[in-house]
Image: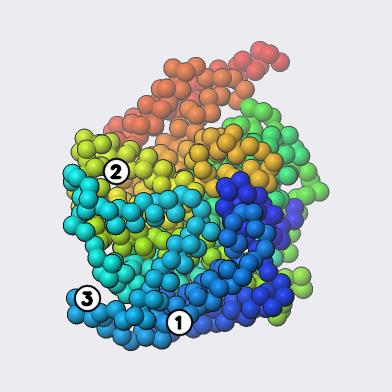
Amino acid sequence: MSAPQSGGGSRKGVLALLGETQRVRPGGIIGIIVAVLSVVAVFLIGWLALYGIATQHHQVALFLVLLLPISFLTTTATARAARLTPVDVIFAAAGCIASGWFAAHTDRFDNWVTGFSSLSPGDTAAGVTLFLLCVELCRRSVGLGLTAILFTLLAYVAFGQHIGGSFRHAGVTFDYFLEMQVVGTDGIFGAPLYVAASYAFLFVLFGNFYVASGGGQLFFDLAAALTGRSIGGPAKACVVSSGLYGMISGSPVADVATTGPVTIPVMKRLGISAERAGAIEAASSAGGAMMPPVMGAVAFIMSNFTGIPYYLICQYAALPAVGYYLGVFALVHLEAVRLNLGRVPEDEIVGLKIALIRNWPRLVPIGVLLLLLYQGFSPAYIAAGSTVSVVVASWLTRDGAIGPRRFVDACVDTCLSMVPLTAAVAAAGIIIGSIELTGLSGKFTLLLFELSGGYLVSSLLVAAAILVLLGMGMPTVGVYIMGIALLAPVFIGKFGLPMMDVHMFILFYSCMSSITPPVAVAAFAAGAIAGANPFRLAPYACKLAVGGFVLPFYFVFNDGVLLQGSFVKIISDTIVAAALVLSASLALHGFIRQRPMAWLLRGTLVLLAVAMAVPHPAVQYGAVAAAIGLYLILRRDANAAEWKTT
């Protein structure tokens, strides 16, 4: 199996299906400008993040000085436009100038006193320009979902004082609104964009350098060696390789676009339908943002908002992420047994020993990353040190050596990958600022209580539905930020749930939003590669991702699986969590080998799975024992039926 070198074709297909604008990689003088800006961005952002010589406002301003021009020089205005226009160039220059204004006057903004300091005409011009460009970039690179929410909130800020009822606010002046959005740390220059400008950028850089060095080949070789010879080997190899790559990328769509061009054709060639192949890839990739050690930008944003160190968040997320992939793998196996799917051809399996020998230099950066992570270094040092190790280790292989050309290409790829993330977190900052200005969070709490009756479980169900709805067309990080702005205060403040439990609940459902219809971005990406209808693909992907839907409701009440509590509690909760995921998977699958299960028995398994979430050991262990007993009886009957037919 060979690793793909580019996911560009599939990404264009996704954009076309979603009706978004096109991403381009310009040549000529514009291409040179983009390349120079990208290389400068890598060195400047790396320097600032490592040595901490810039304040939050200054670092974000410098980041936008470089990323806004790159964004508008690589994203067209409409889906029909295949090339850049003079307007795009003007927007790029305007973004550089407006951001440069804030970078040049950072001392004044760092010492700003609300109510006493006032905006100058230059501040107003630069602030309005920067604000409008961030909104336009959101429209271009993120799509309708987040942009619609953004415009709705802006309309609420402007006209909310004229509506009646509890959602009325006192009104916001233009100067105060602009001050909040471009001076304070609750708007564009807030935590989301700061995290993207520091930690997230460096980890995306690490991932792109790792792929440039041929690191993707390691994942495919290992996956084929570990699972290729078992029944349904291609599908299982997809789950393993996508999970491994997701540990580095942290992005469901990027995961699909990178691993999908290899895994999906192999699955189709060995008898798996296009819809199922795409769904397996989408579900396997959806867990990327919840799988340590990288977890996309979400882990760093979570650390910033909660004050919990990054390495601890990775530890807390590890077991739930494994539980998610346990569910995907179990359903893939059950389906492979039912359909008697084939194995990966022997000539495409290199063997585990050969895979490790051939790719051992590519294991070095992973080892360095894990070592730095568990030594407790800052995220910036972890990402920078791991990236340096990628470059050095690449020189140990002839085909993966990173020279000047690959170095520049990886820098450009990193900045291009950051465009949608930059747009999403800038828009999220605007949204958070608007929520703060209008007090919408408290009003939303009242609405949630009215919808749920004030009960915890029903409130969690409503919150899960809201996160899925918010995720229509939004990136994971955007859904997560909206969730912590609107939902986290309810469960932490009103219900008294632990902060880590609430944030992990929001993270899981933010990841699930990438595969839930009607706008499932990871499913669209997989459908474009598989040549399948994404609306038929997404429901099956949701079925495979059952662990992602049930585990959050489990660890909110049983947080041992989040490494909270004693060692005995952690082991106990982890075992029950695994049993819950497997029971739910079997109930959804509905077959014991080739024999269908009666609906009554499937319902019984569902009820037992629900009982396993009850935070009482006697109830949990009784439900686990009953589920195991029921499965053994059904397995015995299925084997007896097969023996009679033979």
- CA gap between label 2 and label 1 equals 48 Å
Marks 1 and 3, the one that precedes in the sequence: 1
Q: As rendered, which of 178 and 301 lies closer to the eye?
A: 178
Instruction: Give the colouring mode of the picture.
Output: rainbow
**Observer able to see residue 411:** no
Amino acid at dot 1: Gly
- CA gap between label 2 and label 3 equals 42 Å
Task: Measuring from the top left, give residue 307's x and y in whole percent.
Answer: 31, 66
Amino acid at dot 3: Thr
Question: Which residue is found at the position 43% from the left and 72% from the top?
Answer: 129
Residue linked to disc 1: 100
Question: Which residue is found at the position 63% from the left and 67% from the top?
Answer: 85
Tag 1 near tag 3, CB within 8 Å: no
Q: Secondary structure at mark 3?
A: loop
Q: Secondary structure at mark 2?
A: loop
Q: Secondary structure at mark 1?
A: helix
User: 28 left or right of 188?
Assistant: right
Question: Which residue is found at the position 56% from the left and 24% from the top?
Answer: 592
For residue 464, which quarter of the picture?
top left
**Disc 3 crowd, CA 10 A, few/some/many (<14, 14-19, 20+):** few
Amino acid at dot 2: Phe
Mark 2 or mark 3, which is nearer to you?
3
**Disc 2 crowd, CA 10 A, few/some/many (<14, 14-19, 20+):** some
For residue 282, which quarter of the picture?
top right
Question: Can you tell which mark lies on residue 315?
Answer: none
Residue linked to disc 2: 557
Q: Is residue 279 above or below residue 355?
A: above
